[in-house]
Amino acid sequence: MAPAGPLEIEVAIRDLKTNGNPSAVRVILASPDRTVLADEWIKKDESNSNENTNQHQILKLETDASIPGLYAVMITASNDRYGENFTWKFRTNCKKYMIETSRGHRDAFHEEPIVLKDPQIETSLCFLPQRNAFNILISDMHEDVKSVELVDAEGHSIAVLDVKNDSAIYNVDAGIRNATPWALRFDKAQGKVEIEGVTRWDGDDRSSAFHQFPDGSIWTPDINSWFDLHQNRWLLSPYKKVIYGLHGEKSTAVFEIHNNDLNEEKVDLNLEFPGKPWNVQLSDKELTLAPGEEKQISLSWTSSDTTQTVHLRARIGNFTTYSTLISKNGISPVNSPIPMPLVLEPYSHEQEQFGYIPDYPLENQLYFNTYNKPFVRTTDEVWTIRDEKWLSTSTSPMANSIVAFDSDGGIYTLGKMNDHTVLMYSNDGGASFTSYVIPGDTPESIYDIEQFTGHNYSDGPPPITRVIRNAKDKNLFWRRYGDIELLIPKKTKNGIEWEEPILISDKCLGVSSHSGIPSSMVSKGSKIFLCWGEASDPKAGKEEIPGVPVYVTAYDKVTQKLEKPVLVGFGAPANDIHNIPSIIIDGNGYLHVLTGTHGRPFHYSRSITPESTTGGWSKAKPIMVSDGSKSSQTYIGLVVDHENTLHLVFRLWRFNTKNFPDGYYASLSYMSKKEGEAWSEPRILVVAPFSDYSIYRHRLTVDRNGRIFLSYYYWSTYWFYRNDRKGIQRSVLMSPDGGTSWKLASNEEID
């Protein structure tokens, strides 16, 4: 929390690795509006590669913090997303600072201890205690340390933790916390510190009224540096907004003011001009917000023939920061194709680079009904265009982000009502929905509903699959499986009624709902074609079971006959729930299947006989890129257009590139397959701003005219980067010409 004046930060890095991949450390300094002021790499010191020394590499950052506010320093490392292979320390002339050590993504509850590594000094670890009961565990302490004292903000002792065998534990009862923050006092700064609600939390914590501020490991070694970051996080959103306009055009920019505290707060707002003042007007000078409340304010102006900038200042008590509005003259680049790849930069994504501000909802992907009208499912609404405006209809909470259709204009989506999953149906264009409970629903049920992928048309309500995972392997984390059933809704004079569930398999690994959302079924006439991946014997060798077995079958709604399952291929590795396959049907009735994989090449197979799963399949072959061994594909998004060209979007690892020469990154990549031709080479659509693990939560859809729409948002492994921005920053790329060119979808192209 920097006052006006020079800001100095010095970071010292010590590499703990003696061999293996380099751990180049990246340090980024950003202003309150998240303009990157410095982006520096501290390369691995090769002279220390064979021995572990105490030598530090030092980086000094200096800037003129001419405008006070909440500045940020990010420290990351290639090939080390958890920050376990280096130690760091810093000093700064700024007296108010906090540290957030939430780092790499894990497929488990968040758990990242704070590790103190300098026994030559005394220190404190100051933190905000949760109101729930919680425990403190300290281990690996210096042998000379006999106790650690826990004190409140006024220095009053809460407890003395006795150290036994270099460890100490203390349990804190639930209750209201006075005189916060609390602090652990260490005579020697050595130890691994675990505090529930600070270094560890889970879903129960998030839902608890006693847990004030989840999802942030925020602390400081000096109680005098503490400021109210928890209560004022996301006070202003977004940090920066870029808007294009023609000279004389009236423009408006909307910002959100958020109260993250448990108390009502008054927020003072004003405008500050880094240059000559201009004609921008602020809608509100003061707002009062209830706990957790968010309100919008607007800035209005008439665009000029130059670029103009203004800072929006927000203040609560002693806490102050700002966002920036940049008004640019001209037509937004959103209206033109983008030279691919789109390279995301730290804190500079689609909006900041292109002025991307769509009218259409961005929470989830776009689907298009029989009349090519767009629909978007959000948390508790369905959006579409009525009377030339995007309007919403309130619904039950979302159980699945897919919006499905029938040939009669019916609209379907899945929701939750009174702890039951329901099929919601609209026969009036989405103006209203009626809910129908799915029979046999259980809390463990996971549902999928048929989505439009280019040529699948149902003669009634779309089929649904239900997966109930009732088995998991304690020795294989991703081996979780259970029953998959086919559910067939039908229209009657009473609304929606159901046929008896049809068991497809008792070894299904499940569905993919966060990235790719591959199509698990397609309909043509009275036939439903399904594919799924199965768990297999974990003792089987790779030659016998080289991956997840992928099966297909067909069900005829008229004859009520289920075909015998057919094995079409394997998706490596075996017993991995990431490896969800996809099935689509082209305009000639041929079925196409891709096996899901986790960092391996997808395998592709096509039916030999149209509209048949039993008439033979081509041999499943890997989709290889030029370098072969680096075909690290995951999360299938697959559709087909009017020309029977297959379009595929997926996450692809890229190694030792010019973007990240010392590591790897996740790209969002595209391939296509024209009818009768081989798969194209992958084309990178989006480059990540950071190295190491990330996903894009991507969903690929197609409209009734064959245009391709790709909804995605960059999800970094670095928790503090994700948590620094409030809400989801989703975007939509579209290709009007079969994948040749790509652009950010404009409002006119969706409308």
Image (tube, grey):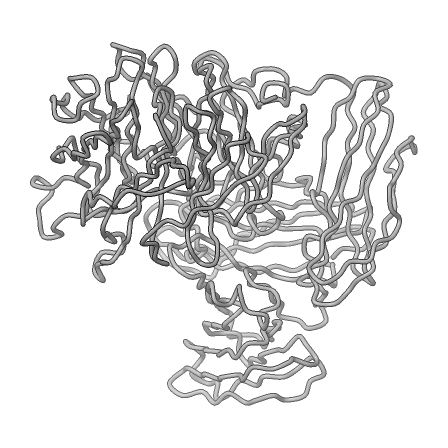
Q: Is residue 272 above or below residue 469?
A: above
Q: Is residue 599 above or below residue 231?
A: above
Instruction: Tell me, yes or no, if residue 123 can be seen here.
Output: no
Q: Is residue 410 above or below residue 222?
A: above
Instruction: Tell me, yes or no, if residue 548 can be seen here.
Output: yes
Residue 692 vs residue 561, the one in the foreground: 561
Residue drawn at x 42%, y 37% is 665
Residue 713 vs residue 528, the one in the foreground: 528
Q: Quadrant of residue 271?
A: top right
* Residue 390 percent location from the top left of the image: 64, 30
Is 177 placed left or right of 698 in the picture?
Answer: right
* Residue 681 percent location from the top left of the image: 33, 18
Q: Quadrant of the N terminus?
A: bottom right
Image label count: 0
* Residue 737 percent location from the top left of the image: 47, 11
Residue drawn at x 52%, y 55% is 13
* Residue 437 percent location from the top left of the image: 41, 50
Is 76 placed left or right of 442 in the picture?
Answer: right
Q: Quadrant of residue 22?
A: top left
Q: Quadrant of the C terminus?
A: top right
Q: Is residue 333 above or below residue 652?
A: above
Is 237 placed left or right of 47 in the picture?
Answer: right
